[in-house]
Image (spheres, coloured by chain):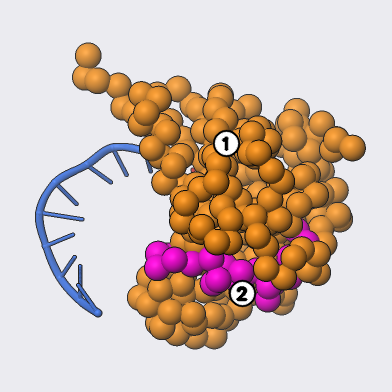
Chain colours: A orange, B red, C blue
DNA sequence: GCGACAG
DNA sequence: ATCTTGTCGC
């Protein structure tokens, strides 16, 4: 069953806001995925270089638990976004392309790690949650900065340190110091993955870098694809 | 009204 | 997100 058109391409901001409220109702906060996901995908988007027309390039990478750093496959999708970037509405800008990229993968992953927030969002519908509900697949949100809320308590400097991200008295994500000294990651439930499991899986898929492999590779490959497509800053003439 | 504000 | 060389620290 395909989701409502407004969940993907709403005509305006009001319709988009209404869609987020609807999507948030369908979120599953409990685990409904393999304890040890064998196929994990990572998705991220890159924009066009400054000066170039507004474009979005989505990259989806498929990894296996055994060969975590060697993508089994990748899926690429690109185009002109129908939505501008508005904090709180990122999904409507990137998801059309992310869906296309994920559909190009040869298999349905057991889990998708998304660059951005899950439920740690004003309406509980960040891009990771949005994507998870639309695809009905387990997703985890891994953001590099906060959208809403504040870290409660002290976050240790050591790798593995965590502290809750709280908003309106609710714990919405976990600040995670993935490497000692680096800025923390904000890990949240996307869909069908509990907060605790989300943090556990992100840590398990870390490979010495700040970002977990699925997202790190998607980010890197999206950037390389941009260059390869000559979508960089135009020559001086 | 003012400030904050994923990518 | 993107613009960008060198530089500081483990």
Quick check: A215 left or right of A136? left
Q: Residues within 10 Å of mark 2 (few under 14, many from 20)?
A: few
Q: Quadrant of the N terminus of chain A?
A: top right
Write down the residue under mark 2.
A200
Is A87 colored magenta in this rendering?
no
Is A206 colored magenta in this rendering?
yes
Q: Nearer the viewer, residue A117 or A33?
A: A33
Q: Nearer the viewer, residue A23 or A169?
A: A23
Q: Residue furthest top?
A: A237
Q: Position of residue A64 (x, y in %)?
A: 58, 56
Q: Position of residue A63 (x, y in %)?
A: 56, 52
Q: Is residue A152 above or below residue A193?
A: below
Q: Dot 1 lies on which element?
A: strand
Quick check: A231 left or right of A95? left
Q: Count the marks: how many?
A: 2
Q: Position of residue A28 (x, y in %)?
A: 82, 62
Q: Residue at x 78, y 38 (%)?
A: A7
Which chain hosts label 1?
A: A
Q: Is residue A85 above or below residue A236?
A: below
Q: Earlier in the sequence, mark 2 or mark 1?
A: 1
- Give the magenta range: A191-210
Q: CA distance from mark 2 to mark 1?
A: 26 Å
Whether residue A165 appears in this view of the structure is no
Q: Position of residue A167 (x, y in %)?
A: 67, 70
Write down the residue under mark 1.
A75
């Amino acid at each position: 069953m395909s989701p409502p058109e407004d969940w993907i391409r709403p005509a305006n901001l009001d319709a988009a806001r209404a869609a987020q409220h609807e999507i948030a109702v369908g979120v599953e906060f409990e685990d409904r995925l393999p304890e040890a996901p064998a196929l994990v995908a990572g998705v991220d988007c890159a924009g066009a270089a400054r000066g170039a027309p507004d474009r979005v390039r989505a990259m989806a990478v498929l990894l296996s638990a055994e060969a975590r750093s060697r993508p089994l496959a990748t899926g690429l999708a690109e185009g002109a976004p129908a939505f501008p970037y508005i904090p709180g509405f990122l999904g409507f800008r990137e998801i059309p392309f992310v869906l296309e990229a994920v559909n190009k993968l040869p298999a349905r992953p057991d889990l998708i790690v998304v660059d951005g927030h899950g439920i740690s969002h004003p309406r509980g519908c960040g891009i990771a949650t949005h994507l998870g509900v639309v695809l009905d697949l387990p997703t985890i949100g891994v953001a590099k900065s906060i959208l809403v809320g504040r870290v409660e308590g002290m976050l240790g400097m050591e790798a593995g340190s965590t502290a809750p991200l709280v908003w309106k008295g609710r714990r919405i994500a976990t600040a995670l110091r993935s490497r000692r000294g680096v800025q923390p990651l904000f890990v949240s439930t996307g869909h069908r993955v509990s907060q605790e499991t989300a943090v556990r899986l992100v840590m398990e898929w870390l490979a010495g870098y700040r970002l977990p492999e699925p997202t790190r590779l998607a980010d890197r490959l999206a950037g390389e694809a941009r260059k390869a497509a000559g979508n960089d800053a135009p020559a001086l003439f």
